Amino acid sequence: MIELDGEPAGSEALAALALTNYGHFTTLLVEDGRVRGLDLHLERLIRDCRTLFDAALDPGRVRALARRAAPERGRRTVRITVFDPALNLGSIGAQARPRVLVTARPAPGTEPGPLRVRSVVHRRDLPEVKSVGLCPTLRLRRRAQREGYDDVLFTGSDGQILEGGTWNIGLVRDGQVVWPGGDVLAGTTRTLLRRAAGDPTALVDLSELDSYEAVFATNAATGVRPVTGIDDREFPAAHPTVTRLAEIHRALPSTPL
């Protein structure tokens, strides 16, 4: 399913998104018509629309459009992208009229396996915005995958751990969870888990990894996922604290879309 403002998306609008590549999005895991952290997804869309387009976004309308892609039963991954097909490289400064693109695909039927990642020095432009401009991230991910890793872990030039390519990272020390601070996109799953468990954020340096006993990734589409390797450091695929977090996540209340 690919709809723009509730109608089949035409090739001209999709070409504008591909060629200009200016906009933002959020991805929902819809289960039996319900979404965990729906309020956070909507807040993200409203905030990012104001940041990128200086325009308001009606959350009720967004929900109605997304609901068209969500089955009452079963699981589906729904992506909501906000962009303006009328903007291009020459007219990017014009008054914007953001439109809502909704796409849907089947959600994975099995739990994703653990991640092995390579650290790279990289900070996304406007890290607080979930931008459609993914080329730098995907370039680094592609290079990592071609060298035997699953993904990349971004760090600052000072070695400070930031975030994964499209996920947040958490670490466990002495059974306690620590979320790296700094300039990152605070994902919905990370925020929900911090609300539920009250775990702190702290600046974590890559050189300190040996003092942590487990590492995990969080993402709205995949939940809580163990990280078993960062560069040449190994971590367990199963750890009681990570298992507890995954159980907390599965038990979180959801909201009808």
Image (cartoon, rainbow, N blue to C red):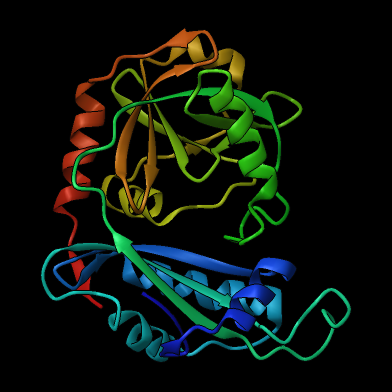
Q: Quadrant of residue 104?
A: bottom left
Classify 38 as above or below 231.
Answer: below
Q: What residue appears at the point 38 percent right and 42 percent down from the top-left corner?
A: 218
**Front-most of residues 200 and 72:** 72
Figure quadrant of the C terminus? bottom left
Q: What residue appears at the point 59 percent right and 88 percent down from the top-left corner?
A: 56
Q: What residue appears at the point 56 percent right and 77 percent down from the top-left corner?
A: 82
139 horizontally vs 233: left or right:
right
Give residue 119's position: percent from left, percent from top. 60, 24
Give residue 39's position: percent from left, percent from top. 36, 72
Give residue 151's position: percent from left, percent from top. 51, 31
**Front-most of residues 244 and 116:** 116
**Front-most of residues 240 and 124:** 124
Figure quadrant of the N terminus? bottom left
Q: Quadrant of residue 160?
A: top right
Does residue 21 appear in this view? no
Q: Residue furthest front?
A: 11
Q: What residue appears at the point 67 percent right and 58 percent down from the top-left corner?
A: 133
Classify 92 as above or below 198.
Answer: below
